[in-house]
Amino acid sequence: MTERLRFITADVFTTAAFGGNPLAVVLDGRGLSDAQMQAVAREFNLSETTFILPPKNSAHTAQVRIFTPAVEIPFAGHPTVGTAWVMAAQGMIPRGEDTRIVFEENVGPVPVSVRWSADQPSFAQFTTAMVPEELPAPPARTELAAMLGLETAEVSAVGAPPMALTCGTPYTCVPLVSTAAVSRAQLDLVRWRATLAAQAAHKVFVFAQTDANSLYARMFAPGEGVAEDPATGSAACAVAGWLAREHNLTQGMRRWTIRQGVDMGRPSEIFIEVEAGQGRITAVRCGGTAVLISEGNIRRPG
């Protein structure tokens, strides 16, 4: 058993190095215990670290386990896009005009497509294993505003309300009235502990619509050791449920671009597609680009 693990890091949901959301990908996680994977993720101390394992179903491409510095999570967007990108760049999946693969994540099978340009990946997009599911309603606007250090009037009272939503990872999705309000939001941890910490949707995704097809967003996840995340694909997928209600999407397909990480100095762009039919969402897809940053070996935890 090797004493060192090979890894590659990538910045995801960006075309520029040192933008987007950093991800560490351990290329071969075989033989690692859950505790060892958690120790490696804690050492990298990024929003997420992934471990590539052989698939349980031979029809699939790989099993991908995803860890924050504090916990394993069933599904996340930038780890899915980033892991596919790294595998493509490393020749671990076939190259073609549009390569279709399937990751086994704890939420279930996640189909991913990789587009290519000059034998290098140019865009990766996954389809969520589940469509957005609405959870019990979040606290009132007054409580959410206080938790975010904002005035109640800065939490939008027009259109779709704040919603707790999940596509495998739950979020409290809070629409704000302006990008300035998004930038000013500061999560009060005392109020967060009293308001949301014990809820399934304890991660907080705040956003404002900049036009009919774009959002400006931030995401806070102190319960998972992530004070703020620069790009959150799973939240982008969850908020598709809010967007479908806000824009009365009952039939057809819509696309949105989500800008995140700007206030952290790590600008990101997440592209989502939402399909609906017969009055309900039938599919959510999330995609973007990535840039390889580093590679090396990390000691196997004892």
Image (tube, helix red, strand yellow):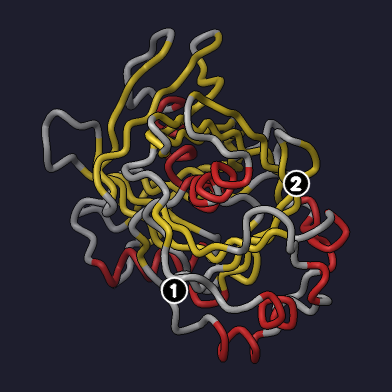
| In the image: residue 27, left or right of residue 272 | left
As helix, strand or loop, the secondary structure at mark 2 comes to: strand
Q: Amino acid at mark 1?
A: Ala
The disc at residue 209 is: 2
Front-lying residue, 274 or 15:
274
Q: Quarter holding the C terminus?
A: bottom left
Front-lying residue, 60 or 89:
60
User: Which residue is at a point 39% across and 54% down the rendered structure image?
Assistant: 133
Residue 191 lies in quadrant:
bottom right
Q: Position of residue 171 (x, y in %)?
A: 51, 63
Eyeballing the image, is 196 above or below 163? below
| In the image: residue 16, left or right of residue 101 | right
Query: Real-space Cα distance between discs 1 and 2?
Result: 31 Å
Mark 1 neighbour class, 10 Å CA radius: few under 14, some 14 to 19, many 20 or more: some
Residue that badge 1 annotates: 70
Residue 281 lies in quadrant:
top left
Q: Position of residue 111 (x, y in %)?
A: 32, 32
Residue 78, visible in the rendered structure: no
User: Which residue is at a point 72% across and 38% down the rendered structure image?
Assistant: 214
Q: Position of residue 146 (x, y in %)?
A: 74, 83
User: Which residue is at a point 75% across and 67% down the rendered structure image?
Assistant: 155
Eyeballing the image, is 104 above or below 301? above
Mark 2 neighbour class, 10 Å CA radius: few under 14, some 14 to 19, many 20 or more: some
Numbered-mark total? 2
